């Protein structure tokens, strides 16, 4: 075989210049046979023989051997070490020119050759880009799109693969394809050829490449991609095929318009069904599928319109089913359920419906979870649920077990998220209920010191929430709270906040409001008098923020009267 190959390479050099088609075809057949038996070794010999430069002259539409030459180039370009030599031999321009011919076999082999040369090759891609190959291929996809005969579908598959290799992990070339309008064509292909698994897979990989770019999502939003993907997903049985579709759905679902389209296309029903089927399985594929489906569900709920469509359209059924994820034995599903419920709770209208559906009670049960990420999300959900819901805030705030658990978690230094949310929920219970009973429960459970500490947080929003809650405590239950406020050194902390130039205007304002409220306690009044509050407050009368300046004048008057 080696001798035959050597002879064929020698003959090719001679016959390429002065030959009959028959003798040329014989040499090419010998090369193809050798490549089929040992591609790497044969490719190496072809490179060393210098025959690649000869191929450039053989790539003409008029030659009957053109398809075989392109086939040989496609085969040798499967080897990484051959791709740059193919470019250096000047094969790209004649190959791109062949894309204009009508012969399907020539087009097929040319598409394969260009696709293989472009695979993971910067030089190959640049050469094809410079020769204008991508635009011609996209034109072919458009003209062949509606043809369903086997030969056309094979050609479409090759051309999709060529574009995939051409643009893979290259934002510039992907943007180029998007600007050329490839997305609507690929979506149309998927719809027409959904029975052809090879072409479908190639479309999905192409979508996966393009979907990461923001500009692509805008184009996808104007197609029926959501409908086509959901339709395709419903037909899949194999795990690998589902994963391929998931890989396209995830980046697309980051776009709010597409989120809504996916919900309307029935994706949620598919995801809920997957969760139901895989939740108790210990198979690796099922566990992976469960994670992907539940993550995607949460992603769909991040969009305001898609979330609301699910909450209202399903008459709460989606919400109720997701709520059942939290007590699951799957940590992944617990977390996804907590995230999903938190997303539903973002909407003001939903809160009342969720509370009447008993979600607060359900969440309280699930707080027993030992997973900090789940606890963190559930605490955040409760905080959102009671926002502007006085009755719910009072009901939760009088729950001694809940308040004691929150106070305990306020010291969970190993889990900063849980600690922060516990503090914020304690404050929210007071701020939204404005209830003496709630305040007494928090005082009796030892929560005051945590609210005072929260006032020193590095986050302005948490500082502010703490100060407002403390002001309500001082206004409604000062006598009960004064000893705890003294031992927590609240007065000293307020002095620091007012003296610190870095304190935000709202922090200064609320600190002064709180100082005035504390004057009603003899114990705390003495502490205020022992510190130079008048000096600090009088300086704030000239503060650039008018509200702060006005409150400083009022506070100064109060301090002067009480001194």
Image: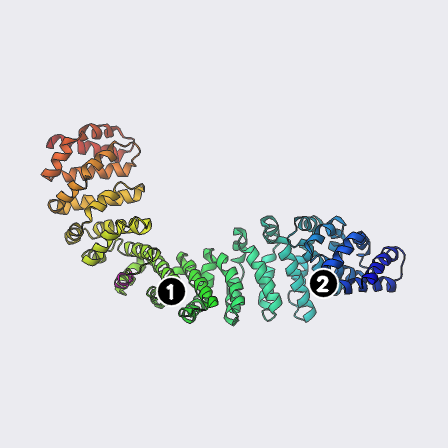
Q: Which mark is residue 108?
A: 2
What percent of the width, then of the height, locates residue 414?
A: 32, 49
What percent of the width, then of the height, locates residue 52?
A: 78, 53
Residue extending farthest left: 522
Could you say which is closer to the camera, residue 62 or residue 37?
A: 37
Picture layout, residue 440 above or below residue 159 = above
- Report the residue marked by disc 1: 330
What percent of the width, then of the height, locates residue 90?
A: 76, 50
Point out the frontmost of discs 1 and 2. 1
Per the rendered image, the range of residues in magenta is 361-366
The quadrant of the picture occupied by the N terminus is: bottom right
**Residue 39 visible, this angle:** yes
User: Is 364 one of the magenta-colored residues?
Assistant: yes
Label 1, residues with CA under 10 Å away: few <14, some 14-19, many ≥20? some
Picture layout, residue 409 above or below residue 28 = above
Secondary structure category for the residue under label 2: helix
Picture layout, residue 20 above or below residue 416 = below
User: Is 256 one of the magenta-colored residues?
Assistant: no
The quadrant of the picture occupied by the C terminus is: top left
Side of 50 where 173 appears, left or right:
left
What residue is at 68 percent from the left and 57 percent from the top?
116
């Amino acid at each position: 075989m080696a001798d035959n190959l050597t002879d064929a390479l020698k003959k090719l050099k001679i016959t390429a210049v002065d030959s009959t088609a028959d003798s040329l075809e014989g040499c090419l057949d010998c090369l193809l046979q050798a490549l089929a038996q040992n591609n790497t070794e044969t490719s190496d010999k072809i490179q060393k023989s210098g025959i690649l430069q000869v191929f450039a002259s053989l790539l003409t539409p008029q030659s009957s051997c053109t398809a075989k030459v392109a086939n040989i180039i496609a085969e040798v370009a499967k080897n990484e070490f051959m791709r740059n030599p193919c470019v250096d031999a000047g094969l790209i321009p004649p190959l791109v020119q062949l894309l204009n011919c009508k012969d399907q076999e020539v087009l097929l082999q040319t598409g394969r050759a260009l696709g293989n040369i472009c695979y993971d090759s910067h030089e190959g891609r640049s050469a094809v880009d410079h020769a204008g190959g991508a635009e011609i291929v996209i034109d072919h996809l458009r003209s062949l799109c509606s043809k369903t005969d086997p030969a056309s579908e094979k050609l479409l598959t090759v051309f999709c693969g060529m574009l995939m290799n051409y643009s893979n992990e290259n934002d510039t070339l992907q943007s180029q394809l998007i600007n050329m309008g490839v997305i609507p064509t690929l979506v149309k292909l998927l719809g027409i050829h959904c029975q052809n698994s090879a072409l479908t897979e190639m479309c999905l990989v192409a979508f996966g490449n393009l979907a990461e770019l923001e500009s692509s999502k805008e184009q996808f939003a104007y197609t029926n991609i959501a409908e086509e993907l959901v339709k395709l997903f419903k037909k899949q049985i194999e795990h690998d095929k589902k994963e391929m579709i998931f890989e396209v759905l995830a980046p697309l679902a980051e776009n709010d318009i597409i989120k809504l389209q996916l919900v309307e296309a029935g994706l949620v029903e598919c995801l809920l069904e997957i969760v139901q089927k895989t939740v108790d399985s210990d198979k690796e594929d099922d566990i992976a599928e469960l994670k992907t489906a539940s993550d995607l569900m949460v992603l769909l709920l991040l969009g305001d319109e898609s979330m609301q469509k699910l909450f209202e359209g399903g008459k709460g059924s989606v919400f109720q089913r997701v709520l059942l994820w939290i007590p699951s034995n799957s940590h992944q599903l617990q977390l996804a359920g907590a995230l999903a419920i938190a997303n539903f709770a973002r909407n003001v209208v939903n809160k009342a419906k969720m509370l009447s559906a008993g979600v607060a009670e359900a969440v309280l049960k699930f707080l027993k979870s030992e997973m900090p990420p789940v606890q963190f999300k559930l605490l955040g959900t409760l905080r959102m649920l009671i926002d502007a819901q006085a009755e719910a805030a009072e009901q939760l705030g009088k729950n001694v077990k809940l308040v004691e658990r929150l106070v305990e978690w306020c010291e969970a230094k190993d889990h900063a998220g849980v600690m922060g949310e516990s503090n914020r929920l304690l404050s929210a219970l007071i701020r939204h209920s404005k209830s003496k009973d709630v305040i007494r429960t928090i005082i009796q459970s030892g929560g005051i010191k945590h609210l005072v500490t929260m006032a020193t947080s590095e986050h302005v929003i948490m500082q502010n929430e703490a100060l407002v809650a403390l002001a309500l405590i001082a206004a409604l239950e000062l006598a009960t709270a004064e000893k705890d406020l003294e031992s927590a050194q609240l007065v000293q902390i307020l002095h620091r906040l007012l003296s610190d130039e870095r304190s935000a205007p709202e922090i200064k304002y609320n600190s002064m409001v709180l100082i005035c409220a504390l004057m009603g306690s003899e114990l705390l009044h003495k502490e205020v008098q022992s510190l130079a509050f008048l000096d600090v407050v009088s300086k704030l009368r000239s503060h650039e923020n008018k509200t702060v300046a006005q409150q400083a004048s009022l506070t100064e008057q109060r301090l002067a009267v009480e001194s």
